[in-house]
Image (spheres, rainbow, N blue to C red):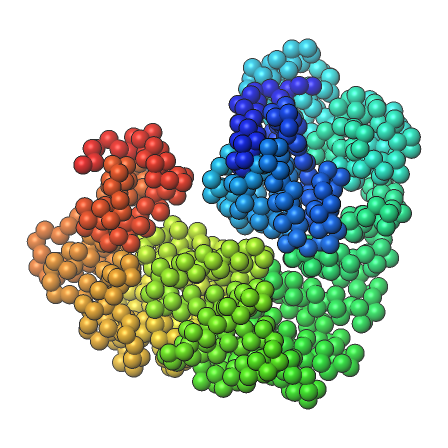
Amino acid sequence: MGGSVLERESELAELAVAAREAQAGQGSIVLIEGEAGIGKSVLVNAIRSALPAEGRLLLGWCDDLATPRVLGPLRDLREQVGRALADALDAGDRGRVGEALRSELDWPGHATVLVVEDVHWADEATLDVLRYLVRRMESLPAVLVLTYRDEIGSDHPLRPLLGLASRAARVRRLRPARLSRDAVRRLCSSSSMDPEAVYAMTSGNPFLVAEVVASGDPNEVPPSIAAAASARLSTLDDTTRGAVEVLSVVPSAVERWLVDAVVPGGLSTLGPAEERGVLHVSPTRVSFRHELTRRAVVDSLSAARRVACNQAVLAALLAQRESRGVDVSRIVHHAAEVGDEAAIAEYGPVAQREAVAAGSHREAVAHGRLVLAHRSAFPPSELVEILERHAVECYTVGLGEQAMVAQRDAVALRRALGDPVALGVALRWLSRIAWWAGDRDVAESSGAEAVEVLGAAGHDPGLGLALSNQSQLLVLAGRCAEALEVGERAVAMARALGDAGLLSHALNNVGLAAWGLGRADGRARLEESLRVALDAGETEHACRAYTNITWQLIGELQLDEASRLLEEAIELADDAEFVGFLRYLHVAVGIVHLARGAWDEAEREAAWGLDASPHTRTPALYVIGRTRARRGDPAGDPLIEEAFVTAARLREANRVGPAAAVLLEAAWLRGTPSALAAAAERVRPWYDEVFRHAIRPVAAEVGYWLRLAGHDVPMVEADHPYAHLAAGRWRQAAAAWARAGCPFEQSLALAASDSADDVVAAVSLVDTIGATPLGRILRERLRRLGVARVPRGPTTSTRENPAGLTNRQVEVLRLLAAGLTNAEIAARLVLSVRTVDTHVAAILDKLDASTRRDAARRAAELGLLTPASG
């Protein structure tokens, strides 16, 4: 039926333009998004008609496998591309694959359209290659088309790739629409079915419409897609229906050789299914007309029949494993479906190793989980390696508890196997994983044992890393002098061994410790750690270096530089799929936004850490909790409470300190002395630890709030605004926070002034950022100063305009639309340039605009520019 291509002229025209641009050497990206059955694949199939005569179409598919094929959609291109890409795919090196794919598309004068279908099912290696390609599409004579479902969540692995693609110079977003009532009416014109009933049943989803109409029974309209598929299958003879059932358990297009192996009679048997619109048959492959049909068939099978179908496919794959180069992940998928422990034992570890080598960390975790469900099939010497790989991969993607369980089991096996070096290395990994999972006791005990075991074994590379691990634990606890002493030994060993990974790791710890002690060489050593890691391709160590540098910079209010480095770090962690570090880095971005008074952005970035390990979840909680407290939203209270309790359990001053400061500030913002007093009583027992071991900005902040609550605590000697404020030097504090672009803290300092003008300036700042509780406190301060006409608070607000902008943001938008620069807007509204930068970023985000011109156009459409901006 042709219903699914109705009303697609505009999308096809967009694709034709993209193809013509590619012919002229101007590459672009097309994102086709929509629900299952909306017509994404139909649109892709119509691309051929939009191609210039010299053009070519390359198609690859992502499959809904339990563990996706590594580089699966790119392997589908093997028969259509040159030898270089085929060889790179055989090697499984995603770096080589990316370079070879770029070269394959660089065919001047011949537009190539590369389509990756259902990219929401892509493995991580494929996503990494696509990220590489997206950054280079502008200069290639090609179009990259990605199709995906619109129901993917905010934490889906595809999201970063879509974000990157959205920023490309030439990008088109196509969202195939549901069919109109008129289109459904035309589709039903040759049948006796009621078009309105069909439309009501399907909501215009093209696939569902086609299925319902194709069932052909006007008296018994199938109530669901499963029933529609069943109606079609019921018209097939037993042989054809059996063949369709076997093919349905293959979650991808089925190659011709596999069809011949599992379907008696081969393609000729499938003719009736093709005629009924169940299958699409070509000389080289067979696929279901739609994925929903395949799933409906699979769901209709009895358990016994499903096992039998998978068994037939598995036998064919195993028979052709060598000659056809069958992906191991496909074998493992079908072996799992039939419970073939022997096949899982033979091929599961291979699939796990392949995924690890390709950097497909999530797939490696999935393979490891499956293999370990059959651990009795492996001898201890093989099982321990599977466990160790699984632990490291779980750690990499941020699954701390699972990593901990696997590594504990690995250590127990290593003890029994009697290899001291392997045991020491395993203990070191257990220490790191335990810290990440929030178990400091295990981290310290296993770390100490690793040093003892590796020292006794005389294994210098392992001992060096174990010493560096101890230094890391010490510096994370704020015991900087001890961390330096142990870390310097590791640095010396690394230099003697010429081990770049160890050197970066050790320099990271001693640099952080030196910076924490205020030594001039601290930052330089951290930066050396970063350079060494990047040069050596040690991504984890580079992520750690970026993290430690940026957090120190944030503490010192060097927010612009921290933001720049965080952008680099996030790109690195995202490319390498180091999910644990990626979440942590996003939380750091949230802290920067919080400091700048960009509440929505702070919450959005911090939310990355809510499902992470305790060390990442804790700052995520207090960033979101503090944001809400500053807005006057009581929903922040339980988050602040959890952050403090969790930080106390982690027993690290640099975790407890920030959570304590947020607890105290939130209590003060409630405006009742008793709330602050109660919070101070909870924090005071921790202050000695924070004072001695936390970084100076953190200690200064906690000390300030405790003094405000009436506790005579010592203050760190630091050139930090909170230290100035605690000493009564509010002007210095306000100036420092103004330079850094921290409007909330600047207002807090101005509130200490006895000048009404200073407090009025503070009121203006807090109204700009929507800090309602502080605004209330400042207005009360003005009344105590005897000000007769206290400025009114912001009007009900910001939700009165359709974009949800604050009144101040509307003012900024009107000036922006008038063509003023951020500096000119700042001068006009008497704001800092950084504050205007924050407003402009928020405006672009709320208006879903990529440029200032887009924002002005969108504002005009919404009627937000009515008062003339002069």
In this rendering, the answer to whether 200 lies above or below 400 is: above
Is residue 605 visible in this depiction of the protein? yes
Q: Looking at the picture, tell me which residue is in the foreground, 22 or 553.
A: 22
The x, y position of residue 293, in whole percent, is 72, 31
User: Please, which residue is most extreme toward the bottom here?
Assistant: 456
Q: Left or right? Give the position of 233 relative to 144.
A: right
**Residue at image point 73% right, 20% down:** 215
In this rendering, the answer to whether 152 lies above or below 111 is: below
Quarter of the image for residue 27 reads: top right
The x, y position of residue 255, in whole percent, is 80, 37
The x, y position of residue 181, in whole percent, is 56, 17
Quadrant (top left, top right, bottom left, bottom right) of the C terminus: top left
**Residue at image point 42% right, 79% down:** 514
Is residue 11 visible in this depiction of the protein? no
**Residue at image point 55% right, 61% down:** 580
The x, y position of residue 703, in whole percent, is 31, 75
User: Please, which residue is most extreme toward the front here?
Assistant: 108
Quadrant (top left, top right, bottom left, bottom right) of the N terminus: top right
**Residue at image point 49% right, 57% down:** 570
Q: Looking at the picture, tell me which residue is in the foreground, 358 or 37.
A: 358
Q: Left or right? Give the position of 685 relative to 320.
A: left
